[in-house]
Amino acid sequence: MKVTVIGAAGWVGMSAAFYVAASRLADEMVLIDVRENLVEHHAMDLSTAVSGLDVKVKAGGYEDTVGTGVVINAAGLHGDITADRTEMLIKNTRLVRDTALQLQKYCPEAVVVTAVNPVDALNYAIWLTGGFERRQLVGYSLNDTLRLREFAARAKGVAVSRVQGLAIGEHGFTQVPLFSSVRIDGEPVSFSEQEKQGIRDAYHAFFERLEGLKAGRTTGWTCAVGLAALTRAVVEDTGETLAGSAILEGEYGQRGISMGVPIKLGRTGIQEILEWDLAPDEQAALERSAEQLKVNARIVEETLRPGADER
């Protein structure tokens, strides 16, 4: 399958491109970025690195995306990861809109994975731009789930590979770790309130420490692993249950937003949005998260209103 990575000269795009190609999840890969010299450099290097896997890599433009099955869009403006992610929402909404229009023109059947923050709002922006079915649009939020598994394993003193579970809601500070979904070796496990709070605190401490390093980087390696997992589900048509931001039309009682939910993902995109029974505190937290997402969604709607660019 042909995979296109937009924003491929950036940390997330570059890492994702390498991991997807090295995992042999594409037989052809197109790398796009406004920094043409840098993306050409990456393409030349990556082409040699994966040549033995029979993966063809090239730098190109949107016209080269014809026939693409999966688009990973990591092109956007990035800010302080501990700051309110709505700060960059308006500019990124316009960038994502312009990207979506190009993708509609050249690869309208592709599954488009949005990996630009704020993910939920920008996935919704692509939906509002028109031209894609909602099944084709997935906002990348799997890092929250990967961290839940890591922190839950630490709390229970087990290997992370033994832990399953999802985090849903906003890909941001109102995310909802679904403790009720956590399994160890496939068996349900309970958490005390102290353990739950410890895991929530671990999320915040992680981001505070990461930003405190002032490295000018986001979590590229984690995104690469997660984006490859989404790509694999599409390429291999696995129907795997993953967490992803999806356009909601009544699921979990919500409309007019994109929000992280459990999804089954396959060749055509989202096969099903799974509506799980949540614990009362999880349901309340999800509703609070949805309210925050509605604020961002209204900003997106206003930004995309005809004539808004001229204001």
Image: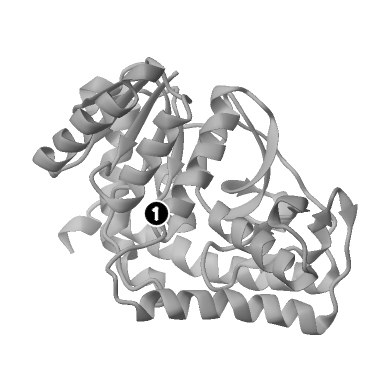
- Name the one closer to the observer, 257 or 222: 222
Quadrant assignment, res 180: bottom right
Quadrant of the rendering where the C terminus is positioned: bottom left
Residue 131 can be seen, yes or no? no
Residue at 80% from the left image edge and 74% from the top image edge: 281
- Name the one closer to the observer, 108 or 210: 210
Quadrant assignment, res 198: bottom right
Q: Secondary structure at mark 1?
A: helix
Give the crowd class for mark 1: few <14, some 14-19, many >=20 residues within 10 Å: some
Residue 205 placement, left or right of 18 = right
Q: Farthest residue in the bottom direction?
A: 194
Residue 194 can be seen, yes or no? yes
Where does label 1 land, which residue?
A: 220
- Give the residue type that dot 1 points to: Gly
> Where residue 103 appears, x then y in whole percent?
32, 30
Quadrant of the rendering where the N terminus is positioned: top left
User: Please, is residue 49 above or below residue 161 in the view?
Assistant: above
User: Please, is residue 135 above or below residue 75 in the view?
Assistant: above
